[in-house]
Amino acid sequence: MIVEKRRIGPDTLLVVEGVIKLGESAVFFSRALERVLEEEGRHVLVDMAQINQMDSTAIGELVGYLGRFSEARRRLILVAPSERVRRLLRVVQPDTLFPIYDSLEAALAAEQA
């Protein structure tokens, strides 16, 4: 798994590639979210377009960090999850938990408003 971090104005973009599942990749993903949470900034956008597969461990990490970002008055925003990932996310009814956008441009435009 690869996680690339970029700043977009006051926001942070994490571009995630590969597989997130129980074990080393889930720990790596969790550490990336933790580092961004510890930094100053506004929202965190997670570009999921290149995620090939996620399991329930990855979903658990996202939900857990959702609460932590919320406590810090920041948003955790999912961008461009594949249809396969969207189906997995539907189990936890993500629309009620996470803002989800089809593209980075749509996410930035909506969150600027």
Image (tube, rainbow, N blue to C red):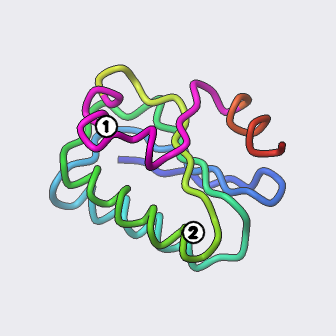
Taking the spot 72% from the left edge, 64% from the top edge, the residue there is 42
Taking the spot 58% from the left edge, 31% from the top edge, the residue there is 101
Name the residue furthest top. Answer: 83
Residue 97 got which mark?
none
Residue 95 among magenta residues: yes
Give the residue pinned by disc 2: 36
Relative to 45, residue 31 above or below: below
Label 2 element class: helix
Q: In the picture, residue 105 is in which quadrant?
A: top right
Taking the spot 33% from the left edge, 39% from the top edge, the residue there is 93
Give the residue pinned by disc 1: 89
* Residue 20 percent across, percent down from the top left: 28, 47
Numbered label tally: 2
Taking the spot 55% from the left edge, 55% from the top edge, the residue there is 76
Label 1 element class: helix
Residue 90 among magenta residues: yes
Q: In the picture, residue 47 is in which quadrant?
A: top right
Relative to 64, residue 88 above or below: above
Give the foreground label among 2 and 1.
1
